């Protein structure tokens, strides 16, 4: 069956604020999994952020245009408008809050004009509202805005991580966002190593002060698009609870408040979605702020961002002027049924079941045997959706039906054999469902994608799909791009299995032989029984022929994202 049968169309350089292994890894290929950032991540620092953090941050709406009154007004609005009760409880002050120089004792100083009474009274007021308090700093010698950073001076010397952590703890900080501008790299030194040293020092400092502070890291965002990105994504998991891994989301422009921002939402979704293998409870990929409801975002786009972030189990950090959100926007952002998808304790990233030129279909497994399914309409025309259980990996002809609920309007669907909706342009339909007695367990099922190297800021240019009979192509949404992950990592499509033999790739009858056994590493390599890596050809040509080659270090044509 072709997936296109589901649908009928009816119509800067960034300012960086910033177990999926099928079988036991052979020793020669265990390096990614044995990375110190990969192993036993300390029970996630005694249970911090076991579900994705939720809250508010000033940056995407205000940038540096805020005062203490701005922060407290938004905190009050979170409570008054019911968003805090829905889970948005962390109020974080971003860059520009401090002075450019430290005091005589080396302590950070709050900007006197913005915070005339200092920072601690702000934190106390936020805590008195039943909320948590977050602060921004930088792993470099200066923040992105040029204010005092915690890291080593630009000519070398002593960092201030522990001193600053003690100060933050004394203020009652509950959440620290550590950016990555101006990190000192010694002459001849390695940039990755310098960032790792800085973020490890911050983790040690936070542990030493004895306060439970959630640690948000921006390090990966400074390596996006180069091979070291995957190395950094591997080690940040050992230090913090969430991390920014790519571009900043588009900010609000008061001079052009209607400037369209949805393309930025789609881009951040595009780079985040393939990274599910790095994520688990206490470790969250962070595609940046929720700007839904703010200027430049329609109600449909607001629904899409909340649905997509929730399907990805992403942090939900609002960044808008909360008091000026429309009642319709507040109702969307405070939709507890959708938020519950995000906050599900299993913490899995959704699988990309299907991608066509205008549509993404996502499936997410949750606790208690439930699932969520979302359909994003990226196109300009409305879309009629008809999804059957077999389209989501449940066995064909099993009589499977679903108890489902439309999460936007709450409509229940009892024993449904099909999920139907008309999805407007830039909107996203989302259902939660429980499979009934004849359904069995769905296969591990969906697309296998490859990220294309370079600066691509759209979904079509950023990822490509693996298709039977063994080609990489632009995603078209056909059944040839739908793969089932079987025993021993077998990759099956169109009734045959991907087979590696004598350095070549072919689709063959599924025999359970070694040539059809694949290991997926943390870095994203698909390693065959011969120890070589599944490799695409030239990234500049389509379709791309495939072969088995020696595994390189994070080569773009050897990195694959599989169904979760």
Image (spheres, rainbow, N blue to C red):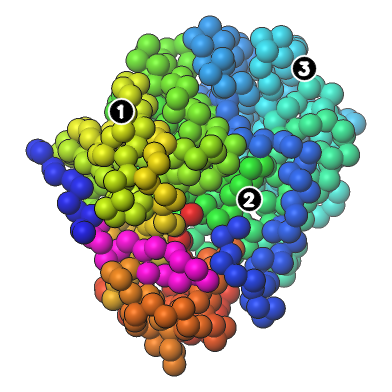
Q: Nearer the viewer, mark 3 or mark 1?
A: 1
> Would residue 74 be visible to someone looking at this image?
no
Residue 488 lies in magenta, yes or no?
Answer: yes
Upstream in the sequence, badge 3 or badge 1? 3
Q: Position of residue 341 (x, y in %)?
A: 48, 33
Mark-to-mark CA distance, 3 and 1: 50 Å
Q: Which residue is mark 2?
A: 219
Residue at x-position 33% and y-position 24%: 412
How far from the left and from the top, in percent, is residue 104?
A: 88, 30
Q: Secondary structure at mark 2?
A: helix
Magenta region, residue range = 477-492
From this viewpoint, which residue is outermost toward the bottom? 502
Q: What secondary structure is marked by label 1?
A: strand
- Residue at 33% across / 68% down in the picture? 493
Q: Is residue 77 above or below residue 288?
A: above
Instruction: State the image coordinates of residue 32 (x, y, percent, origin top left).
Output: 65, 68
Q: Which mark is residue 120?
A: 3
Mark 1 lies on residue: 413
Q: Left of 501 or right of it: where is 520? A: right
Q: Quadrant of residue 187?
A: bottom right
């Amino acid at each position: 069956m072709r997936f296109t049968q589901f649908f009928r169309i009816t119509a800067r350089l960034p300012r960086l604020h910033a177990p999926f292994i099928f079988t036991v890894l052979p020793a020669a290929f265990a390096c990614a999994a044995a990375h110190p950032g990969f192993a036993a991540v300390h029970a996630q620092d005694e249970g911090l952020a076991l579900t994705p953090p939720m809250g508010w941050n000033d940056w995407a709406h205000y940038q540096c245009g805020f005062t203490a009154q701005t922060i407290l007004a938004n905190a009050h609005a979170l409570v008054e408008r019911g968003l805090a009760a829905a889970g948005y409880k962390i109020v974080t002050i971003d860059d520009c809050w401090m002075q450019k120089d430290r005091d005589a004792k080396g302590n950070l100083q709050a900007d006197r004009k913005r915070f005339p009474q200092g920072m601690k009274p702000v934190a106390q007021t936020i805590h008195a509202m039943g909320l948590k308090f977050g602060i921004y700093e930088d792993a470099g010698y200066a923040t992105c805005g040029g204010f005092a950073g915690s890291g080593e001076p630009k000519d070398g010397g002593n960092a201030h991580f522990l001193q600053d952590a003690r100060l933050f703890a004394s203020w009652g900080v509950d959440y620290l966002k550590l950016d990555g501008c101006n990190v000192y790299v010694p002459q001849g030194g390695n940039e990755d190593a310098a960032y790792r040293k800085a973020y490890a020092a911050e983790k040690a400092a936070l542990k030493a002060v004895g306060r439970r502070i959630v640690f948000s890291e921006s390090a990966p965002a400074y390596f996006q698009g180069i091979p070291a990105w995957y190395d950094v994504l591997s080690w940040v998991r050992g230090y913090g609870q969430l991390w920014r891994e790519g571009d900043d989301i588009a900010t609000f422009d008061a001079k052009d408040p209607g400037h369209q921002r949805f393309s930025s939402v789609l881009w951040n979704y595009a780079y985040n979605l393939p990274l599910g293998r790095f994520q688990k409870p206490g470790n969250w990929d962070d595609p940046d702020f929720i700007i839904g409801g703010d200027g430049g975002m329609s109600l449909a786009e607001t629904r899409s961002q909340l649905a997509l972030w929730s399907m990805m189990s992403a942090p939900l950090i609002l960044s808008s002027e909360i008091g000026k959100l429309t009642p319709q926007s507040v109702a969307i952002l405070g939709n507890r049924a959708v938020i519950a998808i995000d906050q599900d304790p299993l913490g899995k990233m959704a699988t990309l079941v299907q991608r066509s030129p205008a549509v993404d279909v996502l499936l997410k497994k949750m606790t208690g045997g439930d699932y969520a399914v979302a359909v994003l309409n990226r196109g300009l025309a409305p879309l009629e959706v008809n999804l059957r259980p077999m389209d989501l990996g449940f066995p064909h002809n099993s009589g499977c039906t679903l108890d489902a609920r439309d999460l936007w309007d709450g409509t229940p669907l009892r024993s449904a054999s099909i999920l139907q909706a008309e999805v407007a342009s830039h909107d996203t339909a989302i259902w939660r469902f429980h499979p009934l007695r004849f359904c069995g367990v769905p296969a591990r099922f969906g697309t296998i994608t490859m990220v294309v190297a370079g600066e691509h800021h759209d979904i079509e240019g950023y990822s490509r799909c693996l298709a039977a009979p063994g080609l990489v192509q632009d995603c078209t949404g056909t059944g040839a791009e739908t793969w089932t992950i079987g025993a021993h990592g077998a990759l099956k499509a169109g009734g045959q299995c991907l087979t590696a033999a004598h350095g070549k790739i072919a689709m063959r009858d599924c025999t359970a032989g070694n040539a059809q056994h694949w290991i997926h590493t943390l870095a994203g390599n698909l390693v065959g029984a011969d120890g070589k890596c599944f490799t695409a050809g030239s990234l500049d040509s389509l379709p791309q022929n495939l072969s088995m080659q020696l595994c390189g270090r994070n080569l773009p044509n050897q990195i694959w994202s599989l169904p979760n």
